[in-house]
Image (tube, rainbow, N blue to C red):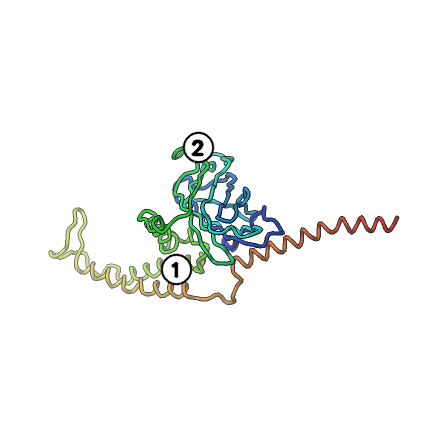
Amino acid sequence: MAEQLGIAPLADNDPRDKYFYEIIVCTGMRRNAGTNSQVCFILSGEDDETDVRAFTDSKRKIFRRGQIDGFLMAVPRPLGYLNFMRVWHDNSGKGKFGSWYLNYVVVRDVQSDTKHVFVANRWLAVEEDDGQVDRVLPVAGKEQLADFSYQFGERSRKDLADGHLWFSVVARPPQSRFTCLQRVSCCLCLLYVTMLTNAMFYNTTGKEEGSNAFTFGPFSVSPEQITIGVISNLIVFPVNFLLIFLFRKSRPHHKRPSRIDRAIKEVHDSNKQTSINDVKPEVSRKTMFCCV
């Protein structure tokens, strides 16, 4: 799970490039939305355009259903205001993992903290939608970002992935400090406290229901049962709400470097290793020449 919190540097980053962009890719929640196909893109701005770049991560699987993936792209110079993003895949995934449903892409300039959003909400699939695996996404304007369908979809996804206690155990947002272990603890607390309150009020209403019971088809509920239900909720939910609040607001024991800083450090470390490997043959040749 710790790997999912990071940003993966693109494998095709040039060691000489020092200008960085963070790219966040959100895969949809639809059935078979994830893909194993190789996804590539071109990012075009007013000042420059990237070459064909490929999304890769050697540590984990990317573009799973409902997953948010982060990448760090290095370029030689700023691209300027971004105009569009062309994204496609080679349809190399086997079976149901050939197609891909893309929700949106967020590109952030690490240096200026400027964000550009590219909204797709479409299939890149041969057997879905219009059969195209290549999309050109213009940068989203204020009207598109304020569109009801976009806002409703994003709010629903965030509420399910982070707000719903049980569902969020497997769909926790990568940037959330509320860990899966803490969420499981809250689920167990809710379950055990509910069982405890049920045991407290078990068989306290008597076997006979009064004439003032409410009947809903085959179901009958007495005022005493409603009262017990309200009291049980007043016991169960405040305890769990407090526990969830404390977990969400808790700070880490020690301050960790940001995801971007870790990714940039990883790029620098790989560049140093590449430089060392490039120097070794030269040293060996010089040594051989001196020996001769």
Q: In the picture provided, is 249 more to the left or to the right than 228?
A: right
Q: Position of residue 172 (x, y in %)?
A: 42, 54
Q: Position of residue 92 (x, y in %)?
A: 51, 35
Lower sequence index among marks 2 and 1: 2
Pointer 2 with pointer 1, Cβ within 8 A: no
Q: Secondary structure at mark 1?
A: helix
Q: In the picture provided, is 220 more to the left or to the right than 155?
A: left
Residue ranking furthest to the left: 211
Q: Secondary structure at mark 2?
A: loop
Q: Amino acid at mark 1?
A: Cys
Q: Amino acid at mark 2?
A: Val
User: How far apart are the alpha carbons under marks 2 and 1?
Assistant: 43 Å
Q: Along the line of sight, which residue is nearer the eye, 279 or 253?
A: 279
Q: Residue at x 32, y 47 (%)?
A: 149
Instruction: Tell me the crowding category of disc 2: few under 14, some 14 to 19, or many 20 or more residues within 10 angstroms, Cα based.
Output: some
Disc 1 target residue = 186
Q: Image height check: is 11 above or below 190?
A: above
Q: Residue at x 18, y 54 (%)?
A: 221
Disc 2 target residue = 126
